Amino acid sequence: MREKALLFDSSTLISFSMNGLFQEIRDLKKAFNGKFIIPQEVREEIIDKPLTSKRFELEALKMQELLEEGVLEMPSSLGIKESIVSEKTQKMLREANDLFYSEKRNVELIGKGEASCLALSKILNEKKIENIIAVDERTTRVLGESPENLIKLLQNKLHTGIKMNKRSMEFVKGFKFIRSTELIYVAYKKGLIKIKKPQILDAMLYALKFKGCAISDEEIEEIKGIK
Amino acid sequence: MVQEKENVLRIFEETKEAIIKEDSFKLNNLSNQTINTASRTQDPDNIATAVVVYSIGKIIERKKYREFPEWNALYKKIISSIDEAIKAIRRGKDKDFKKSIDSLRNYINRLSGKLKEYVQDVFRKAEINKASKIYEHGISLEKTANLLGISMYELALYAGQSKISGVSDGIGLNTRSRVKLAMEFFK
């Protein structure tokens, strides 16, 4: 059977974590025939950095526990060296942040953690390991799915002409994305949610939205309406 | 390097007028005027301008702060920092501009008692508010959080409770296809 991996960006784990949905991550992992992977750069954002302050220390400790339990794993569990991911991340960061420019200046869109998920996905594709990236924040997802449409979004918001460096476009293609909302839907359909009240799916989807998942009310209603 | 210097100069000049007139609404508007530039250029000085001007607006708005004994000195420091910033931009001295902003932050850190707590909290909330504006402009969550030196957790929480994340962009995969992708991946 072909190996597969679900790659987690920081934004998705933050949505789960801020809602206390750690058991749901554990249960999803048990139901998944593959690995849940976080690159080192994501680990820094969701565990290492918040451990140095009081405000999100608890969330960081709970994430660390998931890593120690093996629910979340590092790329080395797939035989991929940290140095390879790092190198590819730097390249991805350059290409992605080189993609759009305005008045002869690049518009830098994504950070290292986000770039590391894209980079790792490319590495796994080359190794024929099926993978999807779970990313809740909008920019990375739109960058990977339709960079041409991201121009319109940026132009509307920045009120300035934005141009695209077509040479870099190929580098940001070939990804598949889901969000924490789709993952919680999977958990719900598989009977993994402990609360059995009729409005639980609605509650969980909106809870994820209110903790940062980029999903609209219309999309939530659409998910709820799926038979 | 301070991007769009003429614009930043104008903003600081108008900020000083607005402080004297106690016009916090104007100060909020002035702060928003730097956000487009800050999002595009990600210049730390433009970002600092947005945060400082917004914070000063909030400080001026809160009349109860004037009851603190440190208030008069703080007010004078705000005005003198703005004056220094204006001089620095006019002379093209970017380092001096940065110093003038930093000196205000350092002064606040050296305040004592409740006023220090309140004002530090104002600045922290200003950073989150401005980060949310930059995120709304299309820069990623992580990139934005790093630019403002705040936690991704904090920005995600703020973004989730505002209208930012919830706008349907209508681009990329549609919802049903995304759900189908997830379900099949878990088979």
Image (tube, coloured by chain):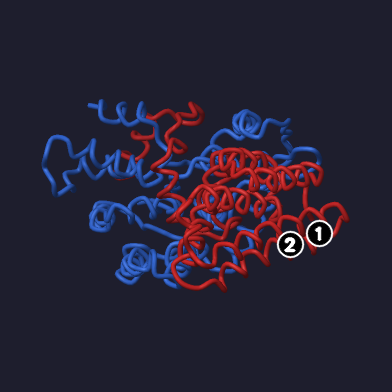
Chain colours: A blue, B red
**Residue lying furthest right:** B91
Neighbourhood count class around disc 2 (C-alpha, 10 Å): few under 14, some 14–19, many 20 upward: many
Observer-nearest residue: B95 or A208? B95
Residue at (73, 30) in percent of width and height = A161
Q: In which quarter of the image is residue B105?
A: bottom right
Q: Where is residue B108 in the image (x, y as percent from the top left)?
A: 57, 67
Q: In which quarter of the image is residue A86?
A: bottom right
Identify residue for label 2.
B98
Residue at (48, 57) in percent of width and height = B65
Residue at (34, 63) in percent of width and height = A59
User: Can residue A79 be seen by looking at this rendering?
Assistant: no
Relative placement, left or right, of A49 versus B17 is left
Identify residue for label 1.
B94
Q: In which quarter of the image is residue A143?
A: top right
Q: Where is residue B83 in the image (x, y as percent from the top left)?
A: 76, 56
Relative placement, left or right, of A113 versus B78 is left
Neighbourhood count class around disc 1 (C-alpha, 10 Å): few under 14, some 14–19, many 20 upward: some
